[in-house]
Amino acid sequence: MSAVIGQRIPKLDAPDKVTGRTVYGHDVKLPGMLHGRILYSQYAHARVLKVDVSRALKLPGVKAILTAADNPPTKFGYGKDNTPIKGDVVRSFRDEVAAVAAVDADTAAEALDLIEIEYEPLTPLFDVRQAMKDSAPLIHPERKSNLFQKYKYSHGDIEAGERESDVVVEADFELPYVAHAAMETSVVIASFDHRDHLTLYSTTQIPFLLQRDLAEALGIEGNDIRIIQTAIGGAFGRGLDIYPYEPIAALLARKAGKPVRISFSRHEEFLAAPMRQPAYIHARAGAKRDGKITFRDAYALLDVGAYISWGSVTPLVMMETTASLYRVPHVKFEADCVYTNNLITGAVRGYGNPQSTFYTETLMERLAQALNLDPVDFRLRNANIPNEETPQGLIITSCGLKECIEAVAARADAGSGKLDVGGNVSSHGSKSNLQSPISNLKRGIGFASTLNVGGGARIYKSDGCGATVKVDDFGHVSLITGSTEIGQGSETILAQIVAEVLGVKVEDINVLNSDTDVKPWDVGVHASRTTFIAGNAAHIAAMDARRQLFETASELLKAEPESLVARDGKIFVTDSDRSTDLAKVARSRHYRQGGKVILGEGWYDPPTKMVDKDTYKGNISATYGFGTQMAEVEVDTETGKVRVLRLVCANDVGRAINPMAVEGQIEGGAQMGLGYALTEELIVKEGRVMNPDFLDYRLFTSADMPQIESIIIETDDPQGPFGAKGVGEMGGTPTAAAIANAIHDATGVWLTQLPMTPERVLRALEEQRK
Amino acid sequence: MTQVLPQIFMAKKFHLTLNVNGEQKEVLIDPRRSLLDVLRNDLELRGAHRGCDSGDCGACTVILNGKAITSCMTLAADCDGDSVITVEGITPADGLHPVQKALVAEGGIQCGFCTTGIVMAAIALLESNPHPTEEDVRDGLAGNLCRCTGYKKIVDAVLAVNA
């Protein structure tokens, strides 16, 4: 057994974090740094007639004010429809209409109050269904339609699928805005040097793409921008695009001639960060009496907000779940992404998958009910299997879905141990065994599975990551990786991979991953890709470094390189005690004429392709992760309150390089999934966020959390580093569906709107009584 | 706590005397500042974090006169003559405090932004209840939000400290 791979090794960055030494963006202070604040629109849709900053400029301490007149000519963002400061028209309450840099935050805030703006209100569009109508006013008139993008996917023959079906189920679903709610709010510090080079301290997840996007937005060259990622206090998809505050900080810094920091207040974070978009979904599914699914058909109407960011691409993931979670012969999926005068929407952990898994897996449960089949058996009959290409073109290699379902079902049979279980358990924990003696407390269990990319996701032409491994004069190893630590533990996982190859201790590895001037290129931290993609790159670089070490060690040890092995910080001749240490080998290369450094190089770009732009088919990821959750709930039929008693989570992760870190992803994902299911909803009324704080936007606390039982299923992926595949997003994708299914098991009602608040549960129970 | 009179707000500066991590400090502060502001900006102690500035997240938790409080909701001028302990104050010169050690070992840390607040809340909890049940720990930390870990490993860590 390896001393490194598969071990519960604490995070390398944990000691600094636990002592408060870690430097986050909020901690960065540069000499002369000014505080930037943004003024947001007072209307959801209006013409801006006049902007008067004269009074604000006179306020002592104000160093620069930005208006639309300062905008560079290029539009930016995923949809190339955004500008730093909005000019003639504002299209949402989060639209930036001016920005100030001042000597301190109070002065900046005071200056915002002194800026006078005259608006002429325009008809706003808050309802995505209204925005779809031909008569609706245009939010971006140059685009001729509020429909930004339409997705149409199909495989098989949906009519044939329907004809074959013995049962068909269908439902309408309504899904809310959800916030990342990272504990650290967004922060950026922009600083120009005397050569007019910009250094940006940032919480971004895409440093290299941001370098390019920001250069374009500012009208400068990419190599004029250096991005330094500070320690990031949570991200969860928030930093996957360029957002206005980033060019605003840069423009303010340039105008003021001083470094400028913009750090969002929590209120601002709930308004201006790119939320998970709300969706209306109609979905149907059918099955045959033998328990085989026949078809799935879904339509999603997505409110992507006033400007386009990644919220408009989530249908790619929704269609993946719809088309390929379980083996479904006939599938149709369509989605419309529509502009409104609401918030910007973007990527939030799971990226479309929590939404699609909610409708897909609750329909699975309805089918099982309609067929009178055990929901576990029904899922097993339709589960994805290893080494099969799905009709969508996903090439599934390692696949532990059946194992996940079985592992979770086995725990369901065991019960929570808290319940007074009586009678015989015949099927998987049927509700009759679980009932509370108190009549208004109904208990039930529910299952849901998930499929998620686990080997990168080729949404850009490259899905690559670079790495270099350097061995220094003291035998210490530096891994310089393109990928980023956002809390998920990538630093430690990558160090484990390198440590295993070089036979050194994990703590002897220094991971450098935060500076675009230093680290090799990478697409970014998204799509659960880091362990697989950056892991493979680090593995390749470490192998290269080892080859160089062996080359020189073979001279020192007078042995063939093939006979050498690296372990315990040394290089041994196999089956002997002849050895030399890494430091000696490195020095031997440094202290000679014509010497060399030990510098291993790695680049990994998986053998995948972008989906076809018309059919949306293709193998987007090198491998896929699977998981199943079982929720046990107690529903109070008098108050509508749902309490989750247990959440059992099994995930096929290929191989757990660090089981403690894997559990951390599962447990943390579950916290987000539980919130999506039961409490989290950013309430947006007529374009305004009604609950922009943690008192009213409810995250699960330690006291709210049920028992989480993580089960790690290992399937040893053929392409993953040491067999590993990604797990970052799967922890929360099936949770809402598992809970909805459990609520149905407990009460007989179906919840189709998230979150499943007491009010909604009560309403459903009332409907049932009618 | 001293009685604070409204007129301190009229003063340009307030002379604050505060025992911070066992050291007597005297600072001239803007009387409107929160304890968190003074710790982070005037005293350069960045271990307490600003997550919400409204007392909802707990990332700014410090121990004031023996009690865990949210420093963002505490007026600094109100703490004149008081004693405050921050994460910097409980960290030994060499190694880690047992609560810190447990959080590292159990994997209760991911992005780390909430971590220092959790350390302080846990220390205060264990001070008043050295052998808490799991429920005690879950209730005791309910004022400290964490978005990364799902709390399980944090709770396990606190339970392990005096186990």
Image (cartoon, coloured by chain):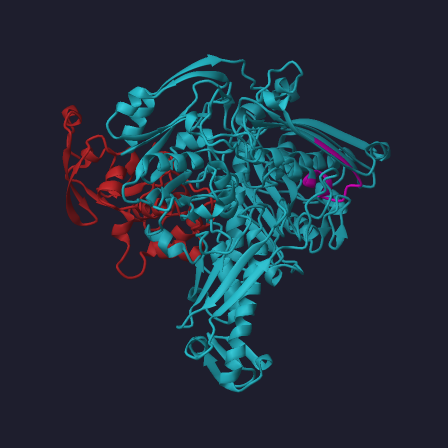
How many callouts does the rendering have? 0
B84 left or right, relative to A506: left
Where residue B127 appears, x then y in whole percent? Answer: 28, 48
Residue A760's quadrant in the figure? Answer: top right
Find out whether residue A543 is within the magenta segment: no
Name the image quarter holding the C terminus of chain A. Answer: top right
Q: Which of A756 and B52 is in front in this view?
A: B52
Residue depicted at 32% across the width and 30% down the height = A64
State whether residue A707 appears in this view: no
Residue depicted at 63% across the width and 20% down the height = A129
Where residue A639 appears, x then y in whole percent? Answer: 52, 25
A139 left or right, relative to A491: right
Q: In this view, does A575 lie above or below A12?
A: below
State whether residue A374 appears in this view: yes
Residue A294's quadrant in the figure? Answer: top right
- Chain shown cyan: that is A
A503 left or right, relative to B96: right
Where residue A619 appears, x then y in whole percent? Answer: 71, 48
Find out whether residue A326 is within the magenta segment: yes
Name the image quarter holding the N terminus of chain A. Answer: bottom right
Over which residues does the magenta segment extend? Answer: A320-334
Q: Which of B120 and A17 is in front in this view?
A: A17
Where residue B122 appears, x then y in whole percent? Answer: 34, 47
In the figure, what tint was chain B given? red
Q: Nearer the viewer, residue A361 or A645?
A: A361
Residue B73's quadrant in the figure? Answer: top left
Residue depicted at 78% across the width and 36% down the height = A295
Q: Is residue B28 above or below residue B134?
A: above
Q: Is residue A583 above or below residue A555?
A: above
